[in-house]
Amino acid sequence: MKKLITILCLLIAVSAIALITRCKTGQTGKQPTDTTITAVDLPTNIVPGFNFPEDSSTIYNWVKGTPPDTVSMLNHAWGIWAGLTAQSGQTFGSDSLLVYQTWLGIGGIQNLIFNNITSNKGMRTHTSPVLLSKPRQFFDAIKFASKKLKAIPFVDTNFIQWVAVAYNPQAVSHVVSNSLFKASVIDSLQRNHIGSIPQFPPNALTIKPVYLIAKPGDKAVRIPVWPGPRTTPNGFPPQSWNNYVWVDLSGKVVPSGRHLKPADSTANAAQILAATCSVNDFIHFKLDSNMAAYMNQQQGVQGIVAKAGDVALLVAMHVTTKEINNWTWETYYWAPDPDNPLEPSSPVAAKLRPAQLKGASRHYAVGVAYAMVQPNQPISGGTNKGASPIFTYNPYLEAGFGPATFNLSNQLNPNFKYGIQTNCMSCHALADNAKTDNSFYSADQYISLNDTAIFKNYVRYDFAWSFQVGVEKDFSKLKESRFEKLK
C-alpha cells in the first residue's frame, strides 16, 4: 500500500489534477483524412435470447404485468448495451470504433439531405465521427426558467458535459427518405388539429452519448461521479455532487477493474488512491482536430475548451428504440462500483448484466422506462388518476433540473418538480415543432398524444427532440463545420 501511495503522490506532484474542462491553449494536429467509417447495424447475436427489434406484443406484456416484468426489460436493455458497445471492426485514428460510434449524427443526416444522397451505401458511409455538441436541454431549461422566474436557474452553464446525438442506419434512412429535416415537409403536415411526422420503423434506434473531456497533460483527472439522490428532492447537478474519482489517463498507474471508493474535494493521498481508476475503465476516444475545432466554435468568446488529442470519457448515454409506439427508453451511466449502482439503477439491475459484457462496458449502470406510469396507459385517452410514477433519469443530464425547468402542469402529482422525478418517455412525448418559448418539459406523468391543449396546431416529432435541431428551412445556409463529413 505504501508503495502505491508513493507512486500516486509522485503522479500528483508532476501532474495538474484539474477539472476536466479547463484548458488554456489549443492546437491542431495531423489527423486521418481518408478514413472511411461505415455505419453498422446493432448486433443481435451477442447475448443469447436477445431479440431486436423485439415483437411489440412481447414488450407490452412485460409492461402490463402486475407487477411489471422489470427483469425482462432490464435483460433487453443489457442486450442493447452489449450491441452498442461491441467492436465494429473499424478504427479512426488510433481508436477502435464501437458499433454506436459508427452511426451518423444530426449534422451528417442534414448533409445527406443537402447533397440528396439516398442510396443505402451513401447513407452509411462517412469519414468523421459524430461531432460533440452542448446539450440542448440545458439551453431550454435556462430559457424556460428565465421566462418563468426572470432569473437563471442553477443548471450547468459551463458545459462540463458534451453530447453526440446519433441515429442507427434504419432511423437515418427513415429521416432521409421522407425528407423529414426539411421545414417545408414539416409545414405540410401542419393542421388545425394535431399533425405528426411518419412514425419511425420498429428497428429504429437513437442515442445520446454524454462525454467529459480530459487533458492528456494532466495524467490524472478528477471527475464527478453520482453520489445518489438526496433524501429531499432538489436540483442536484454534477458541480454540487462533491463526489469524485481520479482517472489515470496513462492506464499504467493502477489496474482496471478496481473497486473504487469515491472521495470529496478534501481527499488526502490515501483517499485519492482508493478513488483512482484506469482510463480503460471508461469507454473513451481521442478528439481529432475537426472535433476540437467544432467544440471551440460553440464556445465563442468563452475560449478554447478542446484540442486534438484530448480524451473524451463516456459517462452516460440515453438510448431509445421504436420497438413499441412510445419507444422503449434505456439510460446508462458510469458507476464507481458497477456491482452496486445507486438509484435510479440498482444492484438487482447490475446482477442481470450478461457475461458477454467485457471491460469498460461493464462499468455502467442501467435504468429503463418502458411506460410513463404504472399501470401502463393507452397511447391516447389515458389517465393519471390512480397511477403510480416510474422515475427514470440520467444523473449527468437531468439531475440538475429544478422546478423552473418543468413548465407543464403535472396531473400525476403537482409536487413532481425535479429532474430525479422525471421519466424519459413523458418528456419526449412533448417533442413537436412548437417554437422553444412554447415548448414544454415535464416531470413524470401520463401524456396523451391527442391532448389538444398541448399539441393543437403543431406537428408531433414522434418523441424525437433532436428534430428541433435537425429541421432547417435552408440547408445551404448551414455552416459546413456543422456537417459530419460524408465519403
Image (tube, grey):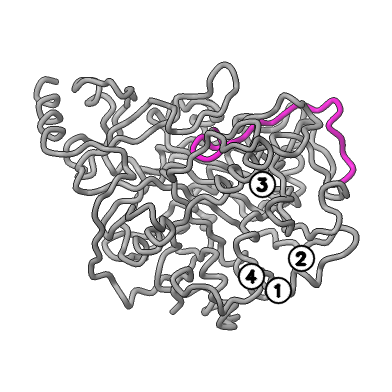
Q: Which residue is mark 1?
A: 178
The magenta stretch is 380-399
Front residue of 420 and 54: 420
Picture coordinates of residue 341, whole percent (x, y): 47, 27
Q: Relative to 25, is 458 on the left or the right?
A: right
Residue at label 3?
328
Q: Residues within 10 Å of mark 3 (few under 14, many from 20)?
A: many
Q: Amino acid at mark 1?
A: Asn
Q: Mark 2 near mark 1, Cβ–Cβ under 8 Å? A: yes
- Work out whether residue 21 or residue 61 is closer to the camera in this orientation and state it: 21
Between circles 3 and 2, the one closer to the viewer is 2
Magenta stretch: helix, strand or loop mostly: loop
Distance, label 1 to label 3, CA atoms, is: 23 Å
Which quarter of the image is occupied by the N terminus? Answer: top left
* Disc 2 secondary structure class: loop
Packing grade of label 2 (10 A; few <14, some 14-19, many >=20) is some
At label 4, which amino acid type do we have? Glu
The amino acid type found where label 3 is placed reads Thr
Q: Nearer the viewer, residue 486 or 418?
A: 418
Disc 1 packing (10 Å; few <14; some 14–19; many ≥20): few
Mark 2 lies on residue: 198
- Looking at the image, can residue 359 be seen? no
Q: Secondary structure at mark 3?
A: strand
Q: Amino acid at mark 2?
A: Pro
Mark 3 or mark 1, which is nearer the start of the sequence?
A: 1
The residue labelled by disc 4 is 472
Mark 3 and mark 2 lie on one chain; the one further toward the N terminus is: 2
Nearer to us of marks 3 and 4 is: 4
Q: Nearer the viewer, residue 85 or 312?
A: 312
